[in-house]
Image: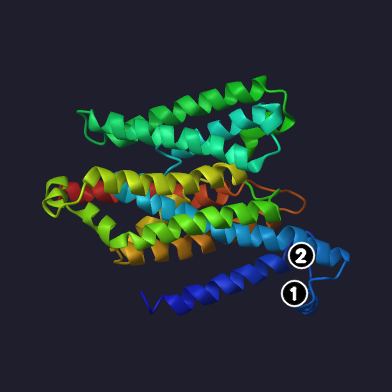
Amino acid sequence: MKRYVPTISILIVFVFFLSLFVGSYTINPRELVSLLIHPGADSQEAIILWQIRVPRALLALIAGAGLAVASALFQNTFRNRLADPAIIGISPAAAFGTLIALSIGSFAENQVVISLFALAATWATIGCLFYLERHSVMSNSLLILGIAINALFSALIAVLAQMSNNPQSRSFVSWSMGSLATVTWPDLYLMTGVVLLAIIFSVSSAKTMDLLYISDSEIRGVNESPSRIRITAALSGGAIIALSTSVLGVISFIGLLVPNIVKAMGFYLHRQYLLLSGAMGAVLLLISDTLARTLIANLELPVSIFLVVIGVPFLVSLVLRKQVSNGA
């Protein structure tokens, strides 16, 4: 892993400063450096940089890292490489919880309360997935259950969004494709605290989670509980998904792409697996968000569009490769 650290670090720094430089209003490099050194300036450029671009770029890095780590946790928790939160219904559940909070007038402006609603819906859905999967007699039941849950929450979101009197709720269907257009410094503070705590907790439990690569009977043989390991990992990932979804909307495919790429690079032990997934997820979301706001002049595109363009071919190739492997 050490040989990748310099490359990823340089890439993160380069993409971060590029995201500050480009946009509908271009800040030339000399002025950008000056504004970064002297953040107290009150010019139009300073406002654009410090109130819009800096928190947005930092939040993209934090959210991208969190989404990738959460998805890595879910893939190993459910022992399925296709267990992206947006595919198996976890992200739509968080979106539904968010929409319920937005539909209640007294909660619509309180991001902490909105996130708690999203967290409740997320953890409830994770509990349902564990229960249903355990009692299922079908192979690949997780994906089938996830599709059903996804469809259910998508329908509920559409109905509730149309019934709500809150303009923010009524635009929720389009926002559910994911966007960083309205992020603020308080959003960044909240997201950073939760995501970093969840990542630190997960990495500190890496050796225990490495046991997920063996069977449940073998895990019990070393005096560990497979259910406790899986539930703890899933709840940590769920907290990240709930918060990021309540702030940014449903961001698809980043969790499908990054953890599988990291495993393809040969990293399976959770300490390296989670850290490298987080770094690559941060870069990928920041690049996607920069493209979303700059590719077409005066038009903000949903960030998930770029992830889907990459993710769909990857998903198809992953499934076909698995089928070929099974056939052999």
Q: Residue at x 69, y 34 (%)?
A: 108
Q: Is the residue marked by circle 1 packed among few (<14), some (14-19), or many (20+) residues within 10 Å?
A: some
Residue where numbered disc 1 is placed: 36
Does residue 81 appear anywhere in the picture?
no
Residue positioned 64% across, 36% down in the render: 174
Picture residue at 26% right of the left edge, 36% below the top: 140
Q: Residue furthest front?
A: 223
The residue that disc 2 covers is: 49
Secondary structure beneath label 2: helix
Image quadrant occupied by the N terminus: bottom left
Q: Amino acid at mark 1?
A: Leu
* Callout 1 touching callout 2 (CB < 8 Å): yes
Query: Quick check: can you spot residue 28?
Result: yes
Distance from disc 1 to disc 2, alpha carbons, whole Å, reads 9 Å
320 to the left or right of 101: left
Q: Nearer the viewer, residue 300 or 40?
A: 40
Q: Amino acid at mark 2?
A: Leu
